[in-house]
């Protein structure tokens, strides 16, 4: 009888411990479920945001240049914030009404052309200034 009481006491003690652990586990499970649902919501909103951003990038690349641009097929530098292809040039085709990335050799030619034009403008300006000085000194 004494042995039965000890066994009964030990078993009820273990049962209480198991019930407490079960309660704690259920509580933790509910907390994890809530956290998981919150993460899922964030994940979906991030995905939606990324899709919207990607669509904006696509829309931005396909917009025609504004009417104030002088040349219909002028080449513009891509905005490196919008697109990961940093430093690539795009050409607007008035025929297909869309932007096309130039192949590397054409891109190099385009850069070279831009720098030549800048250099020519600079040289012309310098030459003009020098000739001005020469004319004023020869007229004296």
Image (cartoon, rainbow, N blue to C red):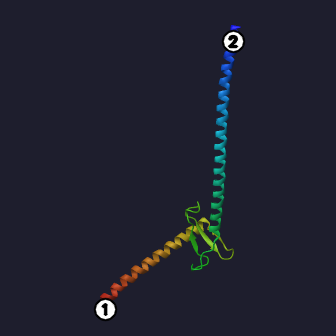
Residue drawn at x 53%, y 69% as measured from the top left: 111
x and y percent of residue 96 in the render? 69, 74
Q: How many marks?
A: 2
Q: Is residue 104 left or right of residue 8?
A: left
Front label number (2 vs 1): 2
x and y percent of residue 104 in the render? 59, 65
Residue drawn at x 66%, y 32% as measured from the top left: 25
Image quadrant assignment for residue 87: bottom right
Task: Work out whether residue 64 or residue 72 is closer to the camera in this orientation and state it.
Answer: 64
Residue 6's disc number: none
Task: Work out whether residue 29 or residue 108 is closer to the camera in this orientation and state it.
Answer: 29
Find disc 2 in the rendering and name its residue.
5
In the rendered image, the vertical position of residue 130 relative to residue 84, given as above or below: below
Q: CA distance from mark 2 to mark 1?
A: 129 Å
x and y percent of residue 55 in the render? 66, 63
Name the image quarter holding the C terminus: bottom left
Dot 2 and dot 1 residues touching (CB under 8 Å): no
x and y percent of residue 44 in the render? 67, 52
Residue drawn at x 63%, y 57% as measured from the top left: 49
Helix, strand or loop under label 2 = helix
Helix, strand or loop under label 1 = helix
Residue extending farthest bottom = 139
Find disc 1 in the rendering and name its residue.
139
């Amino acid at each position: 009888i004494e042995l039965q009481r000890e066994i009964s006491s030990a078993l009820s003690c273990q049962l209480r411990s198991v019930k407490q652990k079960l309660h704690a586990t259920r509580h933790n499970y509910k907390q994890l479920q809530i956290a998981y649902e919150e993460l899922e919501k964030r994940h979906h909103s991030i995905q939606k945001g990324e899709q919207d951003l990607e669509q904006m990038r696509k829309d931005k690349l396909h917009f025609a240049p504004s009417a104030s641009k002088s040349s219909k097929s002028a080449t513009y530098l891509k905005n490196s914030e919008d697109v990961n292809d940093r430093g690539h040039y795009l050409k607007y085709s008035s025929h297909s009404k869309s932007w096309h990335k130039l192949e590397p050799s054409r891109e190099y030619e385009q850069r070279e052309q831009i720098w030549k034009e800048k250099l020519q403008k600079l040289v012309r300006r310098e030459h003009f200034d020098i000739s001005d000085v020469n004319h004023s000194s020869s007229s004296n």
